[in-house]
Image (tube, grey):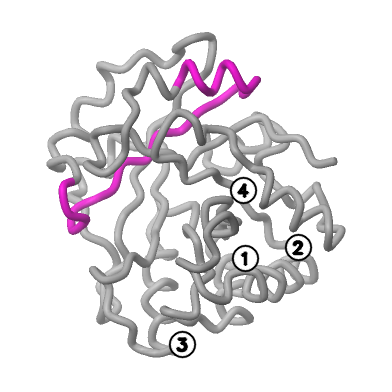
Amino acid sequence: MTEFQLDIHTHTIASGHAYGTIREMAAAAAERGLALLGMSEHGPGMPGTCDPFYFLNLSAIPRRLSGVEIVHGCEANVCNGMGGFQLPQRCVDRLDYIIAGVHLPWYQDEGAEKNTDNVIACMKHEKVFFVSHPDSDRAPLQYERLVEAAKEYHVALEVNNSSLLHPERRPGCVKNYKEMLALCGRRRAPVIVSSDAHDPSAVGGFEAARALLDGIGFDEELILNTDVEKFKRFIGL
């Protein structure tokens, strides 16, 4: 059974539609035996999220809470028209990593080819190390191109536990993950497994993702969550 040491796609009350404080999320991570927690608030464009100024003061947060190492990220919205993502450079400079993600209805589906172009445009940014929930038929993607680009630009594609828990919200996610993961396995492209927790109760929740990965016999060496140092090397910490 695959074991995980870290969860780097989580949201606190600062994201506007999540329900735990920084310390509540860290305490939950400690309770679940995680060694490292990343909090990745939504970037500009998501209704109710924090002002970009929030990211300028991240140094106020201790790097260890409840015995858990803390890293700082942002889940930035993929933009239409190959515009990358919207986050001021002064904010980017304060982050350890950026997760680029398609979020409907903020993002307008342009079809699989153009959607893939838009995601790849974000991958080219030096701080984008992850792509969140690349799994829904509502914003289809060309997975062979996506995996090739992820390998080229040093980006890990995400297996999102929340998507798998709520497939009615992310139609096609199971079949899409199976296709994506088969390609990742062949190309030796790493993946990240995330809870996408919006409440402390979901931090470190990987059960559905673990079942999928174990069920297809995915190579554990390609999963960044299994070792803190492997994760840190990947993002250059």
Q: Secondary structure at mark 2?
A: loop
Q: Which residue is painted at 56% across and 46% down in the image?
A: 194
Above or below, 54 relative to 171 = above
How many angstroms separate mark 4 from mark 2 (CA)? 16 Å
Give the labeled residue for mark 3.
112
Residue 204 at x, y = what percent? 58, 33
> Would residue 127 be found to the left or right of residue 204 on screen?
left
The amino acid on which the numbered mark 3 sits, given as a three-letter code, is: Ala
Give the labeled residue for mark 1.
151
Q: Which residue is painted at 67% across and 55% down in the image?
A: 190
Question: Mark 1 or mark 4, which has the lower sequence index?
Answer: 1
Question: Mark 4 or mark 2, which has the lower sequence index?
Answer: 2
Above or below, 18 relative to 220 = above
Q: Secondary structure at mark 4?
A: strand
Crowd band around label 2 with a 10 angstrom C-alpha radius: few (<14), some (14–19), many (20+): some
Give the number of the disc on residue 11: none
Give the labeled residue for mark 2.
188
The reply to whether the C-beta atoms of the residues labelled 1 and 3 are less than 8 Å apart is no
> Would residue 4 be found to the left or right of residue 117 on screen?
right
Question: Mark 3 or mark 2, which has the lower sequence index?
Answer: 3
The reply to whether the C-beta atoms of the residues labelled 2 and 1 are less than 8 Å apart is yes
Mark toward the viewer: 1 or 3: 3
**Quadrant of the image for the N terminus?**
top right
Magenta-highlighted residues: 26-48
The amino acid on which the numbered mark 1 sits, given as a three-letter code, is: Lys
The amino acid on which the numbered mark 4 sits, given as a three-letter code, is: Val
How many angstroms separate mark 1 from mark 3 (CA)? 19 Å
Q: Is residue 47 magenta?
A: yes
The amino acid on which the numbered mark 2 sits, given as a three-letter code, is: Arg
